[in-house]
Amino acid sequence: MTVKYAPIFELQLSEKLQLLEDLWDSIASQPINVPVLEWQKEELARRKALHLQDPSLVGSWDATKARIRNRKHD
């Protein structure tokens, strides 16, 4: 299969964003096909172990969202 990319770069920004969203939705609809790399598994295991050692290290979801929203962007 030959894919021609040039027309994609000629799209308006809103069209590019929609295409990106559609592609992501297509990938996410079949998560079994998305590989999880070994380093990602190791990082998740490390974070889980830290949480089990001291659950107070993790903030609530609401506090985390607030912290992210309040970040200053340089």
Image: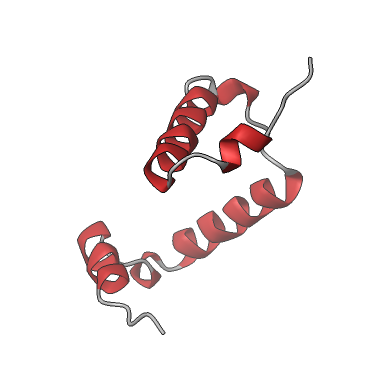
Res. 3 image quadrant = top right
Q: Residue at x 49, y 33 (%)?
A: 24
Q: Residue at x 33, y 82 (%)?
A: 72
User: On the rendered structure, is 53 left or right of 61?
Assistant: right
Colour mode? secondary structure
Q: Residue at x 68, y 34 (%)?
A: 5
Res. 25 image quadrant = top left
- Vertical position of residue 36 compared to residue 34: above or below: below
> Where's the N terminus, which quadrant?
top right
Q: Residue at x 49, y 37 (%)?
A: 20
Q: Position of residue 53 (x, y in %)?
A: 48, 65
Q: How many marks?
A: 0
User: On the rendered structure, is 62 left or right of 13?
Assistant: left
- Vertical position of residue 9 compared to residue 59: above or below: above
Q: Looking at this view, name the residue that lies furthest to the right.
A: 1
Q: Nearer the viewer, residue 38 or 46?
A: 38
> Where's the C terminus, which quadrant?
bottom left
Q: Nearer the viewer, residue 62 or 48?
A: 62
Q: Position of residue 51 (x, y in %)?
A: 46, 61
